[in-house]
Image (tube, helix red, strand yellow):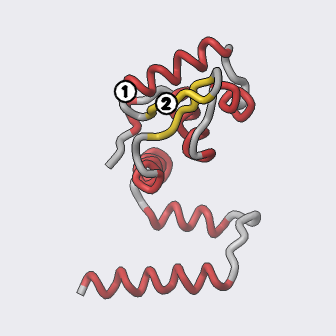
Amino acid sequence: MTDMTHLSRRERQILEIVYSKGEATATDVIEMMPNPPTRTAIRTFLRILEAKGELKHKKRSREFVYYPTRQRARAGKSAFLRVLETFFDGSLEKAVAAHLSDPGAEIGPDELRRLSALIREAKRKET
């Protein structure tokens, strides 16, 4: 499992941008990051992420295009577990309750059916 706890806040922000786009240049990161540091700093962060094994790059024209070295689902699972631990004491129940109690949460009937099916499947695995 990818463990992103070794990354700084800015490194995680940049990595999340690259994951969301599939690949990104320094310009892409600057455009998508709230309150971005300088272009030089972004390039430095991208090189650091590459040195840490989180990103690779290819050259396209005059720019480096960075892409993740790990599957998005694995990185997402790691990030989700970190959020559970940090904000919900490791409790999936507390996280789901927080989401369901949010008046802005839009959960359609199809999604509720899929969630119910996942819960039924988890119960079957217990027995």
Q: Nearer the viewer, residue 86 or 74?
A: 74
Compared with 101, 48 (above or below) is above
Provide residue 117's location: percent of width, then percent of height. Answer: 47, 86
Q: Quadrant of the C terminus?
A: bottom left
Residue shown at the point (55%, 44%) measured from the top left: 19
Identified by mark 2, the residue type is His
Is 46 left or right of 31, judged from the image as shown?
A: left
Location of residue 37 in the rendering, given as x and y in whole percent from the top left corner? 67, 17
Amino acid type at mark 1: Lys
**In the drawing, does residue 46 fall left or right of residue 105?**
left
Disc 2 secondary structure class: strand
Task: Please name the residue shown 61% across and 63% down the image.
Answer: 99
Question: Can you see residue 84?
Answer: no
- Please identify the quarter of the rendering in which residue 56 is found: top left
Q: What residue do we see at 41% from left, 41% from top?
A: 69
- From the viewer's perspective, is residue 83 above or below residue 55? below
The location of residue 96, given as percent across then percent down, is: 54, 66
Q: Can you tell which mark lies on residue 57?
A: 2
Residue at mark 1: 52
Closest to the observer, 93 or 30: 30
